[in-house]
Amino acid sequence: MTGSTGPVRSGIGGAFSALGFLTVLPVPEALAARGRGVATVFFPWIGALLGVSAAGVVRLPGDAYLGAVLALSLLFLATGGLHWDGWADVADAAVPPGLAPERRVAILGDPRVGAHATVAVGLLLLLAVWGLARAPLWGIVIGSALGRWVMVGTLRWAPSLRNEGAGAGMRGDARPLLAGVGVLALVTAATALGGGGRLVLAVSCGLGVAALGTTVLVRRLGGLNGDGHGAVGLLTEITTWAASAQLAPVA
């Protein structure tokens, strides 16, 4: 009995640890501490939960674009804006042409927000609102799950920019293959419910942009830190929303 209880407790702790890391919701610290080593396995499931919440707000009666703004506000509040600050910092560091990698890394650590960050956040917000307003339910949920899985993947497989920080600290515990089981289960369920080939294309778009974004950041910065992992995950999430909205728009 004791041997079977350990993994169960660890799994429950991992789910709470993932919830505490990816959202601002309070979790029992003693319980979450038991599962920190397996927390990344549950990242896609927390993403799916956030996606379901967003989709529920979008589908409320009324204008779809207003619903999308409200859904995005809900996600912002629930996550504390996690990853948007990373997107802004990465844009300031990686977008300007002709800078040496050392200069880009210095900009990445600068708390001030520049013009490139402002434009990048505005453009991604526009794409997010458009995608949320038009994407089917499966597109929103899968996009939110896929974005969190990509963060687990980059933690494990992308070069690390620094040896300290949240990203470096979680690198050894990142389990993309186990986390991928959750994404696969969600994709299978969505396909059975009518996603079909459009779902595969939307997911492919999200993964393609994730690979491209990771490659650009590694070449320009030398590796990814916590901001980079979050930025790539956020871009994947919103790209998947937009791709599903284009492929299977809600009337």
Image: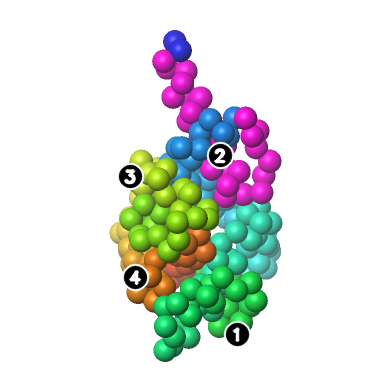
Q: Earlier in the sequence, mark 4 or mark 1?
A: 1
Q: Residue shown at 35%/74% (left/top)?
A: 219
Q: Are marks 3 and 1 in contact (CB under 8 Å)?
A: no
**Residue 27 lies within the magenta run:** yes
Give the SS element for disc 4: helix
Q: Nearer the viewer, mark 3 or mark 1?
A: 1
Q: Position of residue 235 (x, y in %)?
A: 47, 67
Amino acid, disc 2: Ser
Q: Which residue is mark 3?
A: 177
Amino acid, disc 4: Thr
Q: Residue shown at 36%/52% (left/top)?
A: 156
Q: Are marks 4 and 3 in contact (CB under 8 Å)?
A: no
Give the SS element for disc 3: helix
Q: Position of residue 170 (x, y in %)?
A: 46, 48
Q: Earlier in the sequence, mark 2 or mark 1?
A: 2
Q: Which residue is mark 2?
A: 17
Left or right, residue 164 beside residue 56: left
Amino acid, disc 1: Ala
Locate residue 92: give its quadrant. bottom right
**Residue 10 lies within the magenta run:** yes
Q: CA distance from mark 2 to mark 3?
A: 19 Å
Q: Which mark is residue 215?
A: 4
Q: Are marks 2 and 3 in contact (CB under 8 Å)?
A: no
Q: CA distance from mark 3 to mark 1?
A: 38 Å
Q: Residue furthest top?
A: 1
Question: From what the image shows, is residue 178 above or below residue 135?
Answer: above
Q: CA distance from mark 4 to mark 1?
A: 23 Å
Viewer-proximal residue among 79 and 174: 174
Q: CA distance from mark 2 to mark 1?
A: 35 Å
Q: Quadrant of the N terminus?
A: top left
Please provide the residue range marked out in magenta. Answer: 3-30
Q: Earlier in the sequence, mark 4 or mark 3?
A: 3
